[in-house]
Amino acid sequence: MGSLRLVLGDQLNQTISSLEGCDPEKDVILMCEVLEEATYVKHHKKKIAFLFSAMRHFEEELRAKGHHVQYVKLDDEANTGTIAGEVARAIGEHDIDCIIVTHPGEYRLANEVGKWPSRFNLPVEIRDDNRFLVTPEDFAEWAKDRRSLRMETFYRNIRRKYNLLMADNEPVGGQWNFDADNRKPPKKGMDIPAPFRVPIDNITREVLELVGQRFSDHFGDLDPFPFAVNRQQALNALKNFIDHRLNQFGDFQDAMVEGEPWMFHAHLSFYLNCGLLLPLECVQAAEKAYHGNIVPLNSVEGFIRQIAGWREFVRGIYWLKMPAYAQENYLRAGRNLPSFYWSGETNMNCLRQSVLETHRNSYAHHIQRLMVLGNFSLLAGIDPRQVQDWFLSVYADAYEWVELPNVQGMALFADGGYMASKPYAASGSYINKMSNYCQECRYSVHEKIGTDACPFNYLYWDFMARNRARLSTSPRMSMMYRSYDRMDDRKKIDIENDSRSFLDQLESEAY
Ligand code: FAD
Ligand code: DLZ
Ligand code: SF4
């Protein structure tokens, strides 16, 4: 008799809690590629291929260590198509006295695993997910009695707890946050390093063929396929970032350049979120580079804040607020997601570029996600459920625990300000300042109203006017409302009319 150790597709680390104490003589490790996980939203082809390839490489690593792994491929004849179905099959085939699993990252699956003791009539041990710096319980304790949550306070606690960029109990450089230095617009002729690429091996080649056949109707390109698919390659990707891009990461964190999807970002979220990398090793590698005088403090602090701060913070909010969080819709937004989020067919160049890059790479960087794709959904009043499903399916790093708070709390203000103190709403001038998209756009970013005006310009003010009752109570919004109130009535009517006609034809080809 032994235990069944279930390892999910986003738990690919030898140190994962479900493998602690695993006895190669008695215990069976189950890993399964199943249709249900690949289709509960129609994931980008590249995301499925990445995960299946990483899972198959991880299986090899476990076998090399002598473990007994039952690995079910998608096209195995007996594959039931669900994780529970595969657990049932494994129990039928082996002498199993208990199931051990690390807490699934998504509420949907965690809820299902909770039903397994009665379903399988076996004890089910659900272990903490040890791939994070903060447990949901510790986050809940911190959040207790706070009406709204702010990342900055949370982040300082983590810096202290893990002694990150600290000297004598004070932040290195005398400041906790160097964000003000990290908003530089792009420069002409910037030298942006080529992104890290890994050559395709036989396992990946086989998976690419499988995904191309079985998921041909899913969004996205399979080619090119640059991702790391095992632990060593992911460590190489981390080193490549530290050596070549971290230096300028801070300065150009918010910048967007046409034809440069990767910029100076880390491109590590895929690996962090499926277990190939761990957060502490990433932030410690960055800190080491700072102490070695290789990279500036604003870059290192910014990177550490994203991983030790934002990433842990959004996960805490997810587990604190689910399942109700997914249903929140503070601004009562109900419009359908425009078809150009899938096709890229729009004259708005910033959106076209961001969607087409997403289609090609299964990646867009944070400011494209927040200030272009998210901002447009916010201003146009798109139904949050449809926006959630889009973000969850198109990005190779997307799992609900991280996607949902970013969409609901950060991009759409659908939680009414629990996570962000004001909506991340912006007109075209922000996009123009932080990118070169407007230079090649059919619309003029300098026109505020009329058929040639940048739609973000009138939609911004229309959004403010439409949502006044729900937003004007925030002191951080009062300046915006004072500006709106100073506009003459003719201008306000033009804004409303242009917005109405734009939004009415959003589903047609005419925008
Ligand atoms: P970098 O910009 O180089 O940042 C370094 C790391 O910091 C990332 O790898 C990531 O692990 C972490 N990080 C940075 N910002 C955030 C954040 N807001 N929340 C959580 N972690 C963060 N990130 C995901 O991992 N999965 C998602 O599904 C996802 N959906 C998003 C949806 C929206 C609407 C928005 C606004 C943001 C979303 N993000 C998501 C956060 C962020 O955009 C990505 O983590 C980042 O773009 C990943 O690219 P990178 O590795 O190059 O990140
Ligand atoms: C995302 C994903 C996909 C596409 N496929 C699988 C799979 O076939 N088998 C598996 O174990 N996990 C997969 N995953 C990751 C799961 O969806 C993820 O573990 C849950 O969403 C919990 O975070
Ligand atoms: Fe986007 Fe407006 Fe600039 Fe066009 S003009 S790229 S729509 S911000």
Image (tube, rainbow, N blue to C red):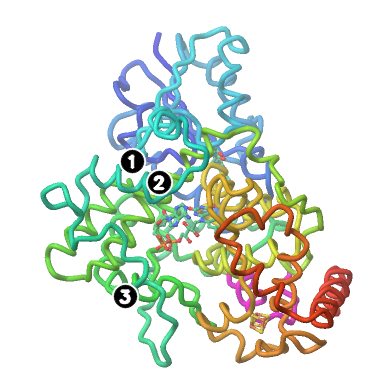
Q: Which residue is mark 2?
A: 57
Classify mark 3: residues with Cα within 10 Å, few (<14), some (14-19) or many (20+): some
Q: Quadrant of the N terminus?
A: top left
Residue 139, given in percent of the width and then of the height, sits at 41, 34
Say which amino acid is labelled 2. Answer: His
Front-lying residue, 270 or 308? 308
Asked if the residue under mark 1 is in contact with the one under mark 2, i.e. CB atoms within 8 Å, the reply is yes
In the image, 412: left or right of 403?
A: right
Query: Separation of disc 2 and disc 1 at Cα?
Result: 6 Å
Classify mark 1: residues with Cα within 10 Å, few (<14), some (14-19) or many (20+): some
Classify mark 2: residues with Cα within 10 Å, few (<14), some (14-19) or many (20+): some
Q: Is mark 3 within 8 Å of ligand 1?
A: no
Q: Which residue is mark 1?
A: 61
Q: Main secondary structure of the magenta part?
A: helix
Say which amino acid is labelled 3. Answer: Gln
Residue 99, visible in the rendered structure: yes
- Residue numbers of the magenta segment: 343-357
